[in-house]
Amino acid sequence: MQKYSVNQQLIETVLAWVNGGEIAIPEIQRPFVWDSSKIRDLMDSLYQGYPVGYLITWKNPKVRLKDGSFSEGKKILIDGQQRITALSAAILGQYVINSEYERVKIKIAFNPVEEKFEVQNSAILKDKTWLPDISQVINGSILKIVREYLTLNPDIDENKIEHTISGLINIPKKQIGLIELSSELDIETVTEIFIRVNKEGVKLSQADFAMSKIASNTEYNGNEMRKAIDYFCHLAVAPEFYKNIIDNDNYFAKTDFFNSMKWLKDEKDDLYDPDYTDLIRVAFTSQFNRGRLSDLVSLLSGRNFETRRFEAEIAEKSFATLRKGVFNFISETNFKRFLMIIKSAGFISPKLIRSQNALNFAYIVYLKLKELRYPDTEIEHNVCRWFVYAILTGRYSGSPESYFDYDIKQISERPFSEIMREREEAELSDAYWNASLVQSLDTSVASSPYFLIFLASQVKDNNKGFLSKDILVRDLIEQRGDIHHLFPKDYLKKQELDRWKYNQIANYVYMQSEINIKVGNKPPEEYFKLIFNQIQSSNTLLSGISSGTELFDNLKQNCVPPEIIDMKIDEYQHFLSLRRKLMAEKIRHYYYSL
C-alpha cells in the first residue's frame, strides 16, 4: 500500500484550508516558539524561490460506524505547525501568542531596492526605503503601493520597484510541498512516521499530535475541548486574557468548560502553571489509567487494541472520558485543593519546584485517590509523600511516560499504602539516607532537587533564616530573599578555592541581606565572635539574636554544625561533610513526617 502522496500546493490554498478548518492545527492560544528572525528567513526563502520543506498531514482514519459504513475526517497536521503559523503572521498579519502569552503581531519589513527582508524595528519605521509591514503590501493594491513608494522615493527606478514589489505580492502564489499520509494507515504506522519526522527541531510533540486529533473532531465536540485546554493554560499564566475570551469568543464563553474555569480570572498563584502537555497528560492518565500519549491518539481515533480496527463507539467513549478528565483538572475545587496540599509540604514557591512531571503525577495521584474515595487525610498524606519521593528518586526525570504508565496501573489495582511501602523499602533504605543522599548533596547546583527539598523542609518546620531572630525561611523565599554563603564567597575565593568548591549547596543558607552585608567576607570564627560579643553586651547590631540558646537553636534549624563557630579555612571540607549529614537527616525526618 502506498503510505503517502506528495503534492505541491499554493501557500494561499494551504492557508485557506487552515482558516477553513480543513487542516486541524492545535495553535489557538499556543505560544509561538520561532523567533522573528526565522519568519524573516522563511519569507526571504520564498521570495528567492528556495525550498522551505514539506508539511505533513494525515487524514483521520476511516472509522467504522454502527451501520457498517466508514466516516472520513479532517486532515491532522503531523509536521509544519510553526511554518504555517509563521506564514499566517507574516502574510495575513494575524496575531501570535509569544512565550509570555502576550498577543502580538510579528511584522516583517521589505526593502524593494535591496530586495531584503528584516524584522520591523524603529529604524526601519523611519527609513522611507522600507515597506514596514509586508502583510499590508501582500493584501493591498500594487498600483497604489508602487505609486506611494515612488512618491516617497522619487529617485528610485520605477521598473525595478514595480518588479520587486510584484515578487513580494506573489509570495502566496508560491508552492509548498504537502505530504499527505494515507487514511488507510494504522495508528502504529502513523505514530512511527510522527516519531521519525520529529527527532530534531521545534516540531510537534505527542501532545500536539493528540491536540490535533482533538481539534479535528467536531462530532464529539473535540474542537470545544481543544479550546478549553488552551484557554485554561493561557488564563493560568495571564488571567487578564479572560476579557479577551468574553469579547472575542462568545460561543465558548457560554460553555460549561468556560464556566468551570472562570475562577482563573482572579487567580494570581503561579505555583502550578500547566501547559497544554501537562493538562492533557494529567487528564488522560487519571481517567484512562494509561501513561503513553500515543495511546490517547489511538483511542480518540477509535482504535480497538484487540481487533486492531477503528470503531466509532470507542472514539465516542474516549472523547467523553477525556472530557471528564479535563473537567476534573480545571475544577477550582480540585486545583486549589491540590495546590494547598503541595504548599502544606513546604513547596510554597515555583522556584522550589524543578520537576513538572513530578508535580503532574502528584495531581494524578490526587485525582485518582479522590475518584477511589480515599479519605481526605489519606489523600493529603499520600500526595505529599509521593511528590517528595518522586523528586528524591528522580522518578520522572527519564522516560516519564513509561513510569506514568506503570505507576497509574499500579495505583488503579492495589492499595496505595502497599505501593508506597514497597517503593520506600526498595529505594529509600537506610543506605539511601545515610550515604546516597549525603553524596547527592555534594554539588554546587543551587537548583538541585535535594537542596530545594531541604528548603521545603525548613518552610514546613517554620524555621528561621540563618542568624534571624524572627524572619522565617518562608518569608525570605516568598519575598525573594537571597541565598548566602556560610563561609563567605569572597573569603573562599581569596583562599584560591575554585567555584565548584565555594558554591557547594552545603555552604548555602537563606539569610537576610542586611545580616549578610554585616557579615561581609569575614570567616566564621570572626563573625561568630561578633555575635557572642553582642550577646554579652546586649548590642544587636549584627543580628537580633540575644542569647546563646537562641543562637544554637538557629544553627540547629539551619542544619549548621555548631563546630563552625571556631572553624578556619583548613576545616572547610570537614564543615561541608558535617552539614551534608545534618541536611540529609533533616530531609529524612521531614519525609517521614509528611
Image (spheres, helix red, strand yellow):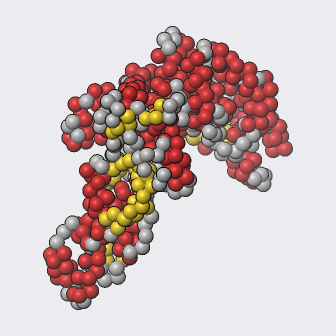
Residue at 34%, 38% (x, y): give it.
Answer: 70
**What's the residue at 51%, 39% (across, down)?**
294
Q: Position of residue 321 (x, y in %)?
A: 41, 26
Give x and y (percent) for residue 411.
Answer: 58, 20
Front residue of 308 and 361: 308
In the rendered picture of this protein, how many numbered marks are placed on residues? 0
Left/right placement of residue 184 relative to residue 527 reads left
Rendered residue at 71%/29% (across/down):
583
Position of 504 with respect to 352 (left or right) is: right
Q: Note whether residue 290 is visible.
A: yes
Q: Nearer the viewer, residue 138 or 49?
A: 49
Q: Position of residue 102 (x, y in %)?
A: 34, 49
Residue 401 to residue 491: above or below: above
Relative to residue 553, is residue 543 depicted above or below?
Answer: below
Name the quadrant of the C terminus.
top right
Q: State which quadrant residue 451 falls in.
A: top right
Nearer the observer, 410 or 316: 316
Residue 481, quarter of picture: top right
Percent position of residue 75, x then y: 36, 48
Residue appearing at x 52%, y 46% in the figure: 189
Residue 464 quadrant: top right
Question: Would residue 265 be visible to someone looking at this image?
Answer: no
Q: Decide which of 593, 582 is in the foreground and name it.
A: 593
Most extreme residue toward the right is: 570
